[in-house]
Image (spheres, helix red, strand yellow):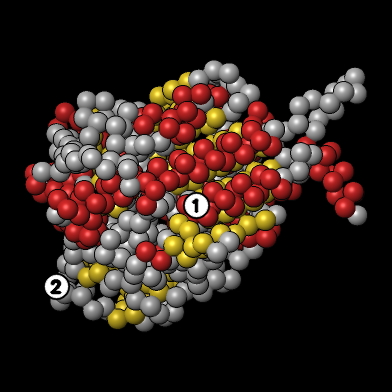
Amino acid sequence: MKNILIGCYLLASVFACSDGSKTQQKPNIIFILTDDQRWDAFGYAGNPLAHTPEMDKLAAEGVFFKNAMATTPICAASRASIISGLQERTHNYSFTTEEMKEEYMQNAYPRVLKKNGYYTGLYGKFGVKYNHLDSLYNVYENYDLRYDRKDRTSYYYQTLGKDTVHLTRYTGEKAIEFIKKSSSDIPFCLQLSFSAPHASDNTKEQYFWDKKYDYVLENTTIPDANISDDEYYNRLPQRVKDGFNRLRWYWRYDTPEKYQHSVKGYYRMIAGIDDEISKIRKELEVKGIADNTIIILMGDNGYFLGERQLAGKWLMYDNSIRVPLIIYDPRAKKHRDIDDMALNIDVPSTILDLAGVTSPSSWHGKSLMPYVNDEKPNTEHDTILIEHLWDFKSIPPSEGVRTKDWKYFRYVDDKSIQELYNLKEDPQETNNLINDESYQGIVENLRNKLEELIKKYKDPYAFNPTHTAFKHNQFSWDVSNKTQNQTAYQILVSSSKENIDNNNGDVWNSGKVESSANKGINYEGQKLIPNKQYYWKVRVYDDINRTGRYTESESFQLK
């Protein structure tokens, strides 16, 4: 039976030529995903604080995408997009939803590879709730830093032999073991998901690194973060000032001592990842497979290191959405730095392209291999959808579009709060042009493009209200799908069409109400004025706590 299985893998992994000879075996692929590593957090990007010789070599010898973007700047949703090949708008997965819907995991990239003869592995943070990892990976070990711990054991709890080691060291060693055991007859795809340089949020120290990296920045005073003066913080919307981005700034950067410790810790943890990559590459050489193993390196989202007096990610600024992306293919002999935008959802299409497998038609990304092969790309990303839709009070959801030269975004819970930046002239996004009359044509074009992309990427399995009605001071609706259950609802009532279109419930915002009720919901807002026109809409949450779309607004009068 074992010989039959190996024979099947061989048929899948080797092409036969017409003369009976065999072409080169399909390549091995190592996909390295780091957690919270922003686009410039390695030396090749021009960062003097980063100690990353191995990442720099990969970039210098491979293809470096200078404008790579995470379509959603948060680890859970970004990882769901990478695994599924879909925009967040479609899969609608976040921390507070239940398991990722099976409809979206059927075409998960590791499953497609596995079905097509690849031996697949995962070590580290999968980052998405899913109970069938064995259907995606031949071997896997899913772990992350321990957020339930309040000290260094958040990163130090895995063991190698008798030693308790940092998670970065553990992940690197698991990769080396995987390579040593790999078969020369069967191509593999190994996903390494490092938890570093993510902070240990529930600890006082925030950052923990292997002490061997103390030398990194040891005699350096970290300069103040860019655009970190009060004026840049004061320009932020109040909901951002009141949210987690500011709270975590107090955890990490609000004193010179914290700032020095946290930024040095961040770069020391990245140095640890870089060291593991060096060891992995040496093992590939020892194994004799380095010349046929592609390495892809990417961060899951961007990160604030004190800019605007903020920490974390989540927002639509480039600090949050720009990520490092390197494709090193030893078979391609030409190095390139690419200015075109590349996306996190392009990575699964690229991996399948490398494997000689056609991407599912449902996927939203495109292969980046034309850039690697110095060919004309099939379709460039001229306008991309960026969004953070997690329905969480302390992080305001937002949505927007980015082009090479422009960015427009707004806050979902009040669409009247908008920002527009000329990225070519203002790359740090400090001059909001949204109210400048001379740019209203650009605003209108970008807003229309945003609405177009929202419709294009809507979730086909969304659970939405239908047949809405307001009678006798009560709201009612039906639901769109009898196979799902409503677990909560939110009603907005506004004094104007403009306010309701902006999702501003200035008369009544019920907030999220956990209830399956959809009939006879009493109005509980401000006192209504007879014969005055009001507007309302509702959205509901499904049985895995995913947020549906708001209904179209309707008007009513109190007689």
- The residue shown at (90%, 49%) is 4
Which structural element holds mark 2?
A: loop
- The answer to whether residue 61 is seen in the rendering is yes
Does residue 51 appear left or right of residue 422 in this picture? right
Does residue 347 appear left or right of residue 95 in this picture? right
- Check disc 1: other Cα within 10 Å, few if <14, some if 14-19, many if 20+: many
- The answer to whether residue 316 is seen in the rendering is no
In the image, residue 296 sits, relative to residue 172, either above or below, namely above
- The residue shown at (26%, 43%) is 218
In the image, residue 491 lies at what x, y percent? 31, 69
Q: Amino acid at mark 2?
A: Ile
Residue 295 vs residue 110, the one in the foreground: 295
In the image, residue 514 sits, relative to residue 394, either above or below, namely below
Residue 446 vs residue 141, the one in the foreground: 141
- The residue shown at (19%, 59%) is 250
Which structural element holds mark 1?
A: helix
Looking at the rendered image, the quarter that the C terminus falls into is bottom left
Residue 169: give its label. Answer: 1
* Circles 2, 1 touching at the beta carbon (< 8 Å): no
Does residue 326 appear left or right of residue 29 in this picture? left
Residue 332: give its label. Answer: none
Q: Quadrant of residue 361?
A: top right
- Check disc 2: other Cα within 10 Å, few if <14, some if 14-19, many if 20+: few
In the image, residue 350 lies at what x, y percent? 58, 35
- The residue shown at (35%, 61%) is 200
Q: Label 2 to label 1, Cα distance in Å?
A: 66 Å
In the image, residue 318 sits, relative to residue 479, either above or below, namely above
Residue 523 vs residue 211, the one in the foreground: 211
Q: Which residue is mark 2?
A: 529
Give the label, 2 or 1, closer to the camera: 1
